[in-house]
Image (cartoon, rainbow, N blue to C red):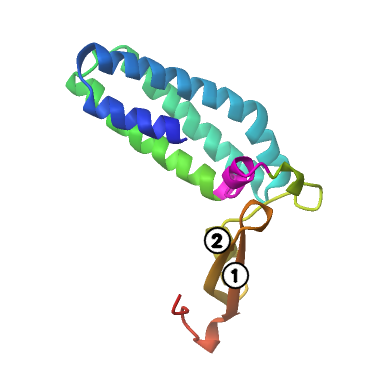
């Protein structure tokens, strides 16, 4: 995702042929990324993440929209007002899509890869939750999260603290 984010920034600042070259690179990266997600991530999400079928379908719909925007952009002259509008829409949509993937589908995957901790993924841990999704789950049961610690174990774990909503303990000072 970082490569794609960087490309969007570079394209926004570039002009002329350089901008066209960067856009071609962005398009290739987005297509390659989508294919990899369709073949690897989406099946895992559908089978391993609670509510995964719905999450995967939402991500697939977003990817289809991005693909349609790319096709429309190819028909426009790079830098034209119509192209700029499509570019800004694509940028916002891709950013939203990436953020949702990073928080809903694979919040700790990056750390696991960066720290080469593949051995921490095994059958007992078939899904991982972000702070946001844990907060939603706890709230549905009358609990509120009031503190969180990020731990280095297992590629990055969260230790969360919760209390009953009626306790009114509020957020910690941390």
Labelled disc at residue 131: 2
Say left or right for 84 vs 120: left
The answer to whether 51 appears left or right of 93 in the picture is right
Front residue of this view, candidates 47 and 30 = 30
Residue 86, can we see it? no
Considering the whole magenta stretch, tell me its main secondary structure.
helix
- Residue 92, located in which quarter of the rendered image? top left
Residue drawn at 59 percent across, 75 percent down: 161
List the single residue furthest toward the left: 81
Q: Magenta includes 24?
A: no
Q: Give x and y (percent) for residue 74.
A: 33, 13
Q: In the figure, residue 154 lies in which quadrant?
A: bottom right
6 over 155 or under it: above or below: above
Q: Quick one: SS at disc 1?
A: strand
Magenta span: 104-116
Q: Could you give the CA–CA distance between mark 2 and mark 1, rounded to whole angstroms? A: 8 Å
Callout 2 touching callout 1 (CB < 8 Å): yes
Task: Residue at 52%, 73% (x, y): give it.
Answer: 147
On screen, 137 above or below 43? below
Q: Position of residue 2 (x, y in %)?
A: 44, 36
Question: As displayed, is residue 97 above or below residue 127?
Answer: above
In the image shown, does 108 or 135 lie closer to the viewer?
Answer: 108
Q: Mark 2, residues whose alpha carbon is within 10 Å: few (<14), some, or many (≥20)?
A: some
Foreground: 143 or 54?
Answer: 143
Quarter location, residue 68:
top left
Disc 2 or 1, which lies upstream in sequence? 2
Q: Is residue 70 visible?
A: yes
Q: How many marks?
A: 2
Mark 1: few/some/many CA within 10 Å (<14, 14-19, 20+) = some
Residue 4's x, y, as percent?
A: 42, 30
């Amino acid at each position: 995702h970082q490569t794609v984010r960087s490309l969007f920034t570079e394209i926004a600042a570039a002009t002329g042929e350089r901008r066209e070259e960067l856009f071609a690179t962005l398009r290739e990266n987005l297509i390659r990324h989508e294919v990899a997600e369709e073949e690897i991530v989406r099946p895992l999400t559908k089978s391993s993440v609670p509510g995964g079928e719905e999450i995967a379908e939402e991500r697939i719909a977003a990817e289809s929209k991005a693909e349609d925007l790319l096709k429309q952009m190819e028909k426009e002259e790079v830098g034209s007002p119509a192209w700029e509008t499509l570019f800004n829409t694509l940028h916002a949509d891709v950013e939203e899509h990436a953020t949702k993937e990073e928080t809903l589908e694979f919040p700790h995957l990056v750390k696991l890869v960066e720290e080469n901790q593949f051995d921490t993924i095994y059958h007992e841990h078939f899904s991982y939750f972000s702070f946001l999704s844990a907060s939603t789950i706890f709230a549905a049961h009358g609990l509120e999260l009031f503190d969180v610690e990020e731990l280095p174990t297992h590629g990055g774990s969260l230790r969360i603290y919760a209390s009953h909503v009626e306790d009114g303990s509020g957020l910690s000072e941390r």
